[in-house]
Amino acid sequence: MATWIGDVFTSDVGWSHLENLVDVGTRMAGSEGERVAAELTRDALADAGARNARLEPVEIQGWTRGDSEIDAGDDRLECIALPRSPAETVTGPLVDLGYGLPADFETADLEGAIVVVRSDVPDYYDRYLHRREKYYHAVEHGAAGFVYRNHVDGQLPPTGSVGTDDHPIGEIPAVGVSSETGARLCRRYEDEPVSVAVDAEIGPAESQNVHAELGPDTNERVLVTSHIDAHDVAEGALDNAAGTAMVVELANALAAREDDLETRVEFVAYGAEEVGLVGSHHHAETVDLASIAAVVNNDGVVGNRTLSLYTHGFDDLEAAAETVADRYDHPIETVPRQSPHSDHWPFVAHGVPGYHVTSTSDDRGRGWGHTAADTLEKLEPRDLREQAILLTDLVVFLAREDVTIDRRDRDAIAADLEAEDLATGMRVTGDWPDDDGTGASR
């Protein structure tokens, strides 16, 4: 055991791939940069020793950012369009809804208004409100435009997609502004007419998923996943070059331990996660779900030192993580709640056991995520290597023939979403699981 641990802790395979990904430039879904990053990941998996490394094309709704602007009185305020915003210009009275809690929308007159909401929720509120939930509350109440104001200081306008599976392009123009710009806007122009202009190129595009394999050629497999794409305003280091670097590091470690794998391990780096989990939905719709023993989805790893694993009510997944934590006398946080916002979800929604692997954080909301500040120097190689050791052993454990992770009934997962008050927001955004258990979230 000690030999492979030393090899992982001194490896630069994952970190080098992380550097390569952030140096690509934009990795926006459907862009040439996303394709370059996918090809680099395919080649890195092959170099690590995984077999049948390949790209699988996925058709998506394309959206390319143009210039956007808020015109308020004598001010022309800096903003960025939210991906999949329609390319339109609208004018209306500015209404500041603060945190944008559901009750705030119910009590305000928003017909024809430009609505401003913060990107966080107050400490006293009992659940996180996703950006898209606030957006669709604004749509439902007749708003003409949507302004998403960062709660993190530093002149950092936030991004993040709008739209639904049925209607990939949103219904009203949407932009992100920095905390400081939002404060100026609301202080000077509350109830005054302002204009929001979004320019974007909209049309069909192609993304791709990366696949590779290790271990015996069994029908059953453990999926080790991440997403390659990132919003085009930043390097996307934490979200999610780090997750894809982790997948490559795990492939490198597991190639050296391939004799320990009793079930096939399939590595999948998805495209187009940031615009609707499109790549993972495509995979879930085209694979035999009964063949998937478990999903280990890396999205948010390396941001902090301690792993945090959402286990979605799968008791066996929680027990497996605790087994590994005890073996190494190293903390791993497990969270038994649902986390419907990354590429494990198209599988978990069908009852497939799945982890959302992230790392502990005291930040509210995304922190630096989805802004220009999501950059490489905020991450540490030590964290990647330590977490890779734990996750390598976790995958080996899940791939044992004598380990069975019981599946969950989709109705039980739906009941958990209700009990955790997540169903409310998912209905607003069109992500509530339908009769066959599907549903997206961005």
Image (spheres, grey):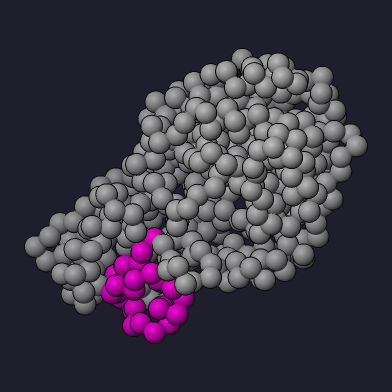
Residue that sits furthest to the front in the current view: 329
Q: How many marks?
A: 0
Q: Which residues are magenta?
A: 95-119
Residue 376 placement, left or right of 256:
left
Which of the pair 146/316 is nearer the observer?
Answer: 316
Vertical arrangement, residue 221 with respect to residue 88, above or below = above
Q: Quadrant of the N terminus?
A: top right
User: Residue 409 magenta-drawn?
Assistant: no
Q: Position of residue 45 (x, y in %)?
A: 62, 21
Q: In percent of the image, x 81 and y 23: which residue is there?
A: 260
Residue 429 drawn at (x, y percent):
53, 65
In the foreground, 373 or 130:
373
| Left/right of residue 77 with respect to residue 25 in the rendered view | left
Where is residue 217, by image quadrant?
A: top right
Residue at the right extreme, as displayed? 402
Measured as percent of width and height from the top left, residue 99 is found at: 38, 69
Indicate whether residue 109 is drawn in magenta: yes
Residue 117 is at least partly visible in this image: yes
Q: Residue at 55% across / 24% down in the picture?
A: 14
Residue at image coords 80%, 41%: 293
Among the 4 quarters of the image, the one containing residue 209: top right
Rendered image quadrant of residue 403: top right
**Residue 30 visible in the shown view:** no
Q: Is residue 99 above or below residue 3?
A: below
Residue 37 lies, in percent from the top left, at 49, 27
Left or right, 145 with reference to 301: left
Q: Is residue 185 above or below residue 332?
A: below
Instruction: Specify whether 86 is left or right of 244.
Output: left
Q: Nearer the viewer, residue 212 or 196?
A: 212
Residue at left offset 78%, top offset 47%: 319
